[in-house]
Each structure stands twice: as structure tokens, then as C-alpha cells.
Image (cartoon, grey):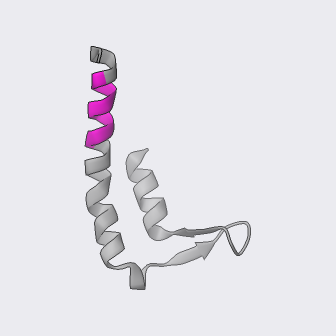
Amino acid sequence: MNEAIADRQNYACDLARHAGAPALDFFERRETLAVETKATAQDVVSHADRAIEALIR
């Protein structure tokens, strides 16, 4: 594996670990998680979705 690919892989793994901790916390409290409807009733998003997406960005 060349160095550029290895760097990207390491970055992706670090990001997944960083986002994984709060994601697990949300998962463990999923019974109380706020969920909103977006465009249609089948298109939902939770507070966890938005929080983890913001963390990754």
C-alpha cells in the first residue's frame, strides 16, 4: 500500500473511532432519542444522526 493510501486509511480509522464513541452513547440511549420527519414520513432523522454528521464534517 502506498503512503498516500495508508494516510487516508489511518485518517478514516481515526475519524471512525472519534465519531464512534458518541454514536455508541446515542445508541445506548436510543429509547429516548428524538426523531424528526424530513421530506416524507419514511424520511426520518434523529438528533444522533445530525450530531454525528456535524462531528464528522
The residue shown at (35%, 72%) is: 27
User: Where residue 29 sits: x, y (%)?
Assistant: 33, 79
- Quarter occupied by the N terminus: top left
Is 53 in front, or is 10?
Answer: 10
Q: Is residue 11 left or right of residue 41?
A: left
The answer to whether 12 is drawn above or below residue 34 in the figure is above
Report the residue at 27% width, 15% height from top. Answer: 3
x and y, in percent, of residue 26 in the image: 35, 71
- For residue 27, above or below residue 16: below
Residue in the picture at 43% in, 44% down: 57
**In this view, 55 is above or below 46:** above
- Residue at the spot 49% in from the left edge and 78% down from the top edge: 34
In percent of width and height, residue 49 lies at 47, 62
Which residue reaches farthest front? 1
On the picture, is 2 further left or further right than 32?
left
Please tell me whether the stretch drawn in magenta is mainly helix, strand or loop.
helix
